[in-house]
Image: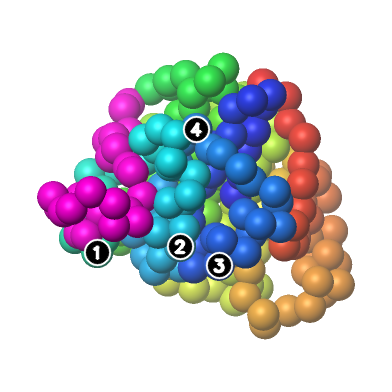
Amino acid sequence: MLASRGATGIVVDTSPEFRLQALRAGIRGIDALLLTHAHADHIHGLDDVRPLTHERVLPVYGNGPCLAELRQRFDYVFRESQVGGGKPRLRLVEAPAGTFDLGGIAVTALPILHGELPILGWRLGDFAWLSDCSGIPDATMDLLAGVRTLAIDGLRKKPHPTHFSVGQAIEAARRVGAERTWIVHITHDHSQAELEDLCGELGSDVGARPAWDGLEIEVDG
């Protein structure tokens, strides 16, 4: 996911196909990388931020366990080596509690659960991104107050131990009070048309719709 305002660009996670997505989106620079967790489908495109760090070091935000795993899995980035070597220039930053500013965008780390694994969602203004989510603690619900547009994990219609189902995602959107809800991290169990029908049936009151590759939305805040 790429969020931008004016000259500020923020990326959430670097999936294995990050290079292809960045080329398609015309990304020529980013100001910060926000990580949800260290599973392969969310970080294995990390090396491809290298050309985006020629001019300056890129701050990478995550929780403690995520950053520790990142150091282990991409150890070549952080150990001393010869000049050159084609490494991305990264600065790991443990996500602070509360809201902080990134180039005029108000950012808040949102502790959530991916099964038993504590991970992060992210709030940017009145938009929130909750991927790979199966539980939202009450304290995080408080941090979501005022969110108008919500992108939330809804893997499929059937329940799953580490992801919300579409129905569970929509119910969570009601608790948040979202006006628009985008279902993300979807399997191939359903067609787009089937998901449109399901979201319309279950979540018209929260504006629920399934997201798709290349989707662009505008939000305030």
Element marked by disc 1: helix
* 144 lies above or below 62: above
- Tell me if 115 is positioned left or right of 153 in this view: left
Element marked by disc 4: loop
* Badge 1 vs badge 2, beta-carbon distance below 8 Å: no
> Around disc 3, counting alpha carbons within 10 Å, would you say few (fewer than 14), some (14 to 19), or many (20 or more)?
some
Looking at marks 4 and 2 on the same chain, the residue that comes earlier in the sequence is marked by: 4
- The numbered mark at residue 17 is 3
Looking at marks 1 and 2 on the same chain, the residue that comes earlier in the sequence is marked by: 2
Residue at 18% across / 53% down in the picture?
82
- The numbered mark at residue 31 is 4
Report how far apart the C-alphas of labels 3 and 1 lie in the structure: 18 Å
> Around disc 2, counting alpha carbons within 10 Å, would you say few (fewer than 14), some (14 to 19), or many (20 or more)?
some
Residue 209 in view of the camera? yes
User: Which residue has dot 2 on it?
Assistant: 45
Q: Residue 214 or 121: which is nearer the viewer?
A: 214
- Tell me if 184 is positioned left or right of 64 in this view: right
Report how far apart the C-alphas of labels 4 and 3 lie in the structure: 20 Å
Residue 164 in view of the camera? no
- Tell me if 25 is positioned left or right of 19 in this view: right
In the image, farthest residue toward the front = 83
Range drawn in magenta? 75-97
Looking at marks 2 and 3 on the same chain, the residue that comes earlier in the sequence is marked by: 3
Residue at 20% across / 59% down in the picture?
75
User: Which residue has dot 1 on it?
Assistant: 73
Secondary structure, magenta segment, majority class: loop
- Residue 41 appears at what percent x and percent y? 46, 68
